[in-house]
Image (cartoon, helix red, strand yellow):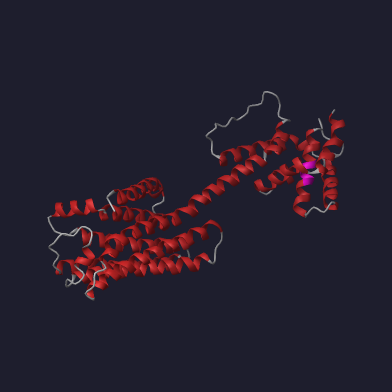
Amino acid sequence: MNGQDYYIPAAAMAVSLVCKLPALRSQWRDPLLRSVCALLVLATAVFTFAAPPTIEAVNRWTGIPNFSAPLVYCLMTAFSASCLVLMFNWRGGPAQEIRRTSVRWITGYSVVVVAIVVFFLLGEASVERLRDFDTYYANTPYVRLMIVSYLVAHSVAAATMVAMCWRWSVQVRGWLRAGLVIIVSGYSISLTYDATKLSAVGARWLGHDLDVLSTYVAPPLASAAALVSAVGFVLPLVCQRVSDSWQTWTTYRRLGALWREVSSTAPSGSPCVRMSWWSPAEIRVIQRESDIHDGFLRLGPRFDRRHRDRAYERARAAGADEETARAVADAAMVAAAVRTPSAAPGGTADGGADGERVLVTADGPRDLVRISDALRHSPVVAAARHRAAPAGG
């Protein structure tokens, strides 16, 4: 593998980190956001310093042969701990329990980091090895302990992630489950990476040569594991945002029938709020709901409870459930009020105020959406509109 195979994912992680920094400044106390940023920092560092050109440059800058080896191993160990901490924060639970668990993992992996540094200082690694350090020094006192320490720590983290994500995946559904399954696949590849490394090192201990596993098979596995795991982390977040955006635009579109119905009663020359094409869907929905409620206020004196009651009874008789029948009844009353130039006899005194209260205080956009759908599709509403048309004329 050349330097680009390391630098491209490092650049991708760095860009993701830059995108997260504004949110981190405003929400510094959010443990999940801090965990994400820590993971991105360490992932960027691992890919950057594990690239052979960087390894050679660091060794030359420090003047210490193989100085990059403990540096990369420490970064990988810290990255393993950050993955575990992120997963605990992502899964949620009591804050104190998450904090205690995170501190235990961080403490344990900090001990491993210290051990890696101590073993490197005690050992002798004077010959620079850019690609086959693990197998070349597999039998060197202390250095081999450093190699085993980082591999065992990485294996424990990968196995824990696989077990934890798999248990969590059977409890959830949707995009979160898909992301967790992908993370399980990524860390399963990480376990394969550890197995190839340990097999090559173990073969050296037994006097055999399986260096090809460590030098040529393991690095692609590490990159594939990182890529797959990153997709697993990102997929639920991105797809959830896309799903939420789709739902918002769907709500905006479905509100169109009711919005056009009540907007037709607006006085000519009344100010109209124009939304720019780049306005977020959420703002568009809020504006459309506001216009609808303004229309309800204008139509309040024309609301006739008798239209509502009659439509409700017909909808129920046709087999509609309670919520649908209420939406049809409200839609029928709105359709009739739009075609009534003044308050119907007995309408304002008997039911207008109550009808206005029912519509204006409806339970959020979902009720408005049901009313809008009834305006478009319900034959009961069409009949009420037809009956009110001669009065409007």
Q: Position of residue 40 (x, y in %)?
A: 35, 53
Q: Quadrant of residue 263?
A: top right
Q: Position of residue 111 (x, y in %)?
A: 27, 69
Residue at image position (54%, 36%) is 279
Is 274 on the left-hand or right-hand side of 331? left
Residue 235 visible? The answer is yes
Principal secondary structure, stretch drawn in magenta: helix
Is 5 on the left-hand or right-hand side of 87? left
Q: Quadrant of residue 264?
A: top right
Residue 135's place in the image compared with 336, above or below, is below
As drawn, the residue found furthest toward the top would be: 269
Residue 152 falls within the magenta-colored stretch = no
As drawn, the residue found furthest toward the bottom would be: 206
Residue 361 visible? The answer is no
Q: Nearest the camera: 207 or 148?
A: 207
Q: Nearest the camera: 180 or 260?
A: 180
Q: Quadrant of the C terminus?
A: top right
Residue 66's place in the image compared with 291, above or below, is below
Is 374 on the left-hand or right-hand side of 287? right
Residue at image position (56%, 45%) is 245
Magenta highlight range: 328-332
Residue at image position (67%, 42%) is 254
Q: Nearest the camera: 124 or 289?
A: 124
Q: Position of residue 293 (x, y in %)?
A: 68, 39
Is 135 on the left-hand or right-hand side of 349? left
